[in-house]
Amino acid sequence: MKNHDNHISSYMLNWTVLLVLLMLTTISILAIKMHLGAYTVALALILASIKVTIVLTYFMHLKFENTMLRLMVGGVFLLFAIVIAITFTDYYFR
């Protein structure tokens, strides 16, 4: 195994990511209060997926990892999207 260099991100980048995450959380809360019906859950899942991607990329330093690990994480997201699509399809046709 090769040794990885430590990747130190700047405070400015961390603050920017924090502000983006707080903004997306605020949008999630406002969407719930607006009562969008069936779209509320879909919007909440989309925003949660975006927030997870940001956390994985910047706070867990996934952007500095090798391609195989990125593909594995992408596969998990693809599997998650398929499960959610099947769930919504089942709910729609009941």
Image (cartoon, grey):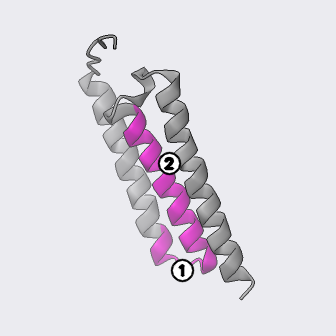
Residue 49 against residue 1 in the figure, above or below: below
Please report the bounds of the magenta region as a residue range.
31-57
Q: CA distance from mark 1 to mark 2?
A: 21 Å
Total number of numbered labels?
Answer: 2
The residue labelled by disc 1 is 35
Q: Residue at x 31, y 14 (%)?
A: 4
Q: Which mark is residue 86?
A: none
17 or 82: nearer the eye? Answer: 82
Which image quarter: residue 81? bottom right
59 or 15: nearer the eye? Answer: 59
Mark 1 closeness class: few <14, some 14–19, many ≥20 residues within 10 Å: few
The residue labelled by disc 2 is 50
Is 24 placed left or right of 76 in the picture? left
Q: Is residue 54 magenta?
A: yes
Q: Secondary structure at mark 2?
A: helix
* Quadrant in which the N terminus appears: top left
Position in image of residue 88 (x %, y %): 65, 73
- Given the image, on which type of amino acid does mark 1 rest? His
Q: Residue at x 41, y 67 (%)?
A: 29
Residue 70 against residue 18 in the figure, above or below: above
- Given the image, on which type of amino acid does mark 2 rest? Ile
Residue lying furthest front: 1
